[in-house]
Every structure is written in C-alpha cells, then in structure tokens.
Amino acid sequence: MRITLDIDDDVLTAAKKLAKRDHKTAGKLVSELMREALAARVEPEDASKPKRDIYGFKPIPAGGYAVTNELVNELRDELGI
C-alpha cells in the first residue's frame, strides 16, 4: 500500500542505512520497525498471551540456569566428545 509520510531527514537516512545493511527495501524495513513499535504500545504486556515471533523465533521464557563453558565441558567429558 502506498502512502505519503513526512519523515525527518535523519530518520529516513538511518532507515535507508539499516535497510541497505539488512538487504531490504527502506519501505519493508520501516514497516517492520513500525509494526514492532505499534505492537509494543498497543498490546499491553500479558504474560498469559504468547508473544509474536517477528524474526521467526518464538521467545522462550526465562528460567532454569545459565549454560557456562564449564557446564559444556563437563557434558563433553561425560559423553566422551
């Protein structure tokens, strides 16, 4: 869909640089950024509702423990790797 927007020069320049870096059109990048910003403002944070996966990965709730190099090395030793 086409629309005319009045965007500040510095914002448009930054969007074009990001779009080039990510191999996307400026319009596609701006749409993605606006979608993220609108979702954060419009939809209140609800822990019972699953979050949208924008980049193809579903967010995993925090929990458990951190995986350290020591833990990885212990598991390697156990498995003989």
Image (tube, helix red, strand yellow):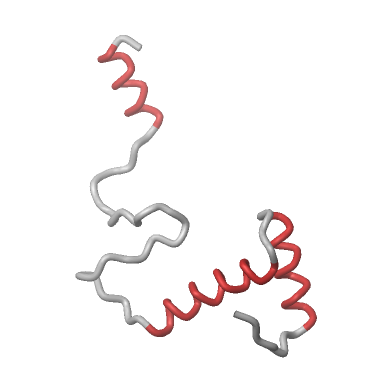
Residue 72 image offset from top left, x and y in percent: 35, 26
| Residue at the image position 23 percent from the left and 46 percent from the top | 64
Q: Nearer the viewer, residue 5 or 61?
A: 5
Residue 55 image offset from top left, x and y in percent: 47, 56
| Residue at the image position 20 percent from the left and 70 percent from the top | 48
Residue 56 image offset from top left, x and y in percent: 43, 53
Residue at the top extreme of this rendering = 80
Q: Is residue 32 shown left or right of residue 46?
A: right
Displayed quadrant of residue 68: top left
Total numbered labels: 0
Residue 15 image offset from top left, x and y in percent: 70, 70
- 12 up-or-down from 75: above or below: below
Q: Quadrant of the C terminus?
A: top left
| Residue at the image position 36 percent from the left and 27 percent from the top | 70
Displayed quadrant of residue 40: bottom left
Q: Quadrant of the N terminus?
A: bottom right
Displayed quadrant of residue 30: bottom right
- 65 up-or-down from 32: above or below: above
